[in-house]
Image: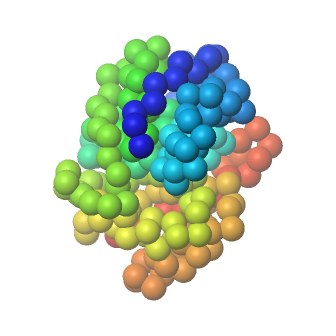
Amino acid sequence: MRTISVKYPTKTQVLDIAGKKFVLEVIRSLDEAIDLLCNELSEEEQKDPFAEDLCPYFGVLWPSARALAQFIAARPELVKDKKVIELGCGLALPSLVATHLKGDVLATDFHPDVEHYVQRNARHSEISIKYQRLNWRESNSIGTFDVILGSDILYESKHPDEVALGLLRYSRKGSTIILSDPGRAYLQKFIESMNKLGHQEEIFFVDVEGEEQFVVLYRI
């Protein structure tokens, strides 16, 4: 699949978290953005299974990302002075919040367009952030971390086992894994996968504009 460059119309969302205003540039309409992407792809390219990976889902501020950011903000000791990685960061709100709370944060994602949005949102929010393109399901070339973050990353049937192994790949004894989820069907399967690997969860609930989001925490 060739590299596709699409200029998606955006809008601004402002959130007040941990005593700071975070200014995020987000995709204006996901449906509109997908239409624009499809216009750039030939009929043959649209049949390519990798075309799905180019969909701009990253450009939406999903409720689970807000929940994870709020959860961290309420417990700054989880990230302060810690080496933190966010996997599949998208717009990277949790990474921005963790950086504001004095974490040493690396935001990562595999989508080729994510870095542009992460760096713009960091500038809008007056935060300096580190970013690396990374397919975290396949390898670990960057070592382990004190805290591993992920939001809404359980959306395919093969993901529960992959996510469990991927998260553990970046952890070490004493690490904390924090995963937020809207309650997708695969959340329970992920929890079962982690249990089989010997790790017990702590479950919390975070309200985001009237919607309850799950936050699952593991102390490795």
Q: Is residue 198 left or right of residue 174?
A: right
Q: Is residue 91 left or right of residue 9?
A: left
Residue 167 in view:
yes
Q: Nearer the viewer, residue 220 or 136?
A: 136
Q: Residue at x 68, y 62 (%)?
A: 184
Q: Residue at x 36, y 39 (%)?
A: 107
In this view, the residue farthest toward the right is 210
Q: Nearer the viewer, residue 29 or 163?
A: 29
Q: In which image quadrant can residue 4 be found?
A: top left
* Residue 86 location (% of width, % of height): 39, 46
Q: In which image quadrant can residue 3 be found?
A: top left
Q: Nearer the viewer, residue 198 or 30?
A: 30
Q: In which image quadrant can residue 140 be found?
A: bottom left
Q: Residue at x 73, y 52 (%)?
A: 212
* Residue 31 location (% of width, % of height): 72, 33
Count of numbered circles on the image: 0
Q: Nearer the viewer, residue 86 or 26?
A: 26
Instruction: State the colouring used for the structure image.
Output: rainbow
Q: Residue at x 44, y 47 (%)?
A: 88
Q: Is residue 57 left or right of residue 104?
A: right
* Above or below, comparing residue 65 to residue 24 in the picture: below
* Residue 19 location (% of width, % of height): 53, 24
* Residue 134 location (% of width, % of height): 32, 46
